[in-house]
Image: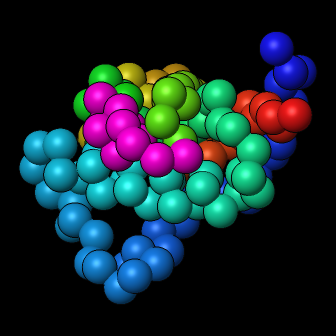
């Protein structure tokens, strides 16, 4: 089997309509949000693979993004069932909400995603350090002979 290589990519962003101008599904309740994200990720990965076979797509998802990892993985299978990314895996790395407290100087992980207070002193004077990520961090690729 050919040797797999890992390539680091720039942060993911929603590119808008797909290449043929079809509107993407809008975010909202249920798997429509995850399906829309997977379609966008698919387009980014397909462009970045440069003709190579994709084994794994590594993704960081912040807790504040309100993405259900199992649903995202399921939708990835639906979006990639046919075509050049068929058989690739989506690996989701969960990123917790981390806060820097301006009152006591502590860096803490939020106890609850919707309660953004310092878990050390209880202050609401905090700066968000992480938790909003949605990044395609790398691809595991194979160049076929």
- Please indicate whether residue 33 sits to the left or right of residue 117 in the image: left
Camera-side residue: 129 or 60? 60
Query: What is the quadrant of residue 17 in the picture?
Result: bottom left
Q: Which residues are magenta?
A: 74-84
Image coordinates of residue 71 in percent, x first then y, are 26, 31
Residue nearest the observer in this picture, 73 or 114: 73
The scheme the figure's colours follow is rainbow
**In the figure, 50 relative to 57: above or below?**
below
* Rendered-image quadrant of the C terminus: top right
Q: Is residue 105 visible?
A: no
- Percent across and percent down for residue 36 are 30, 57
Q: How many marks?
A: 0
Q: Is residue 78 left or right of residue 2?
A: left
Identify which residue is drawn at 27% across, 49% down: 35
Residue 80 counted in the magenta span:
yes
- Examine the image and state in which quarter residue 60 appears: top right
Query: What residue is at 81 percent from the left and 45 percent from the top?
Result: 8
Can residue 40 be seen at all in this image of the molecule? Answer: yes
Front residue (pair 82, 48): 82
Residue farthest top in this picture: 1
Q: Above or below — where is 69 with respect to 49?
A: above
Q: Position of residue 20 (x, y in %)?
A: 40, 82
Say which quadrant the N terminus sits in: top right
Q: Which residue reaches farthest bottom? A: 21
Q: Does the segment drawn in magenta span residue 100? A: no
Name the residue at 41% across, 75% down: 18
């Amino acid at each position: 089997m050919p040797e797999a290589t890992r390539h680091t990519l720039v942060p993911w962003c929603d590119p808008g309509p797909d290449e043929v101008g079809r509107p993407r599904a809008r975010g909202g309740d249920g798997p429509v949000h995850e399906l829309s994200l997977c379609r966008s990720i698919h387009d980014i990965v397909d462009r970045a693979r440069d003709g190579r076979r994709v084994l794994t797509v590594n993704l960081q998802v912040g807790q504040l993004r309100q993405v259900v990892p199992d649903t995202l993985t399921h939708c990835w299978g639906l979006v990639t069932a046919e075509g050049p990314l068929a058989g690739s895996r989506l690996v989701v790395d969960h990123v917790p909400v981390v806060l820097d407290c301006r009152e006591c100087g502590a860096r803490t992980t939020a106890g609850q995603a919707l309660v953004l207070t310092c878990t050390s002193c209880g202050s609401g004077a905090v700066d968000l350090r992480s938790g909003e990520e949605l990044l395609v961090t790398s691809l595991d690729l194979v160049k076929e002979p």
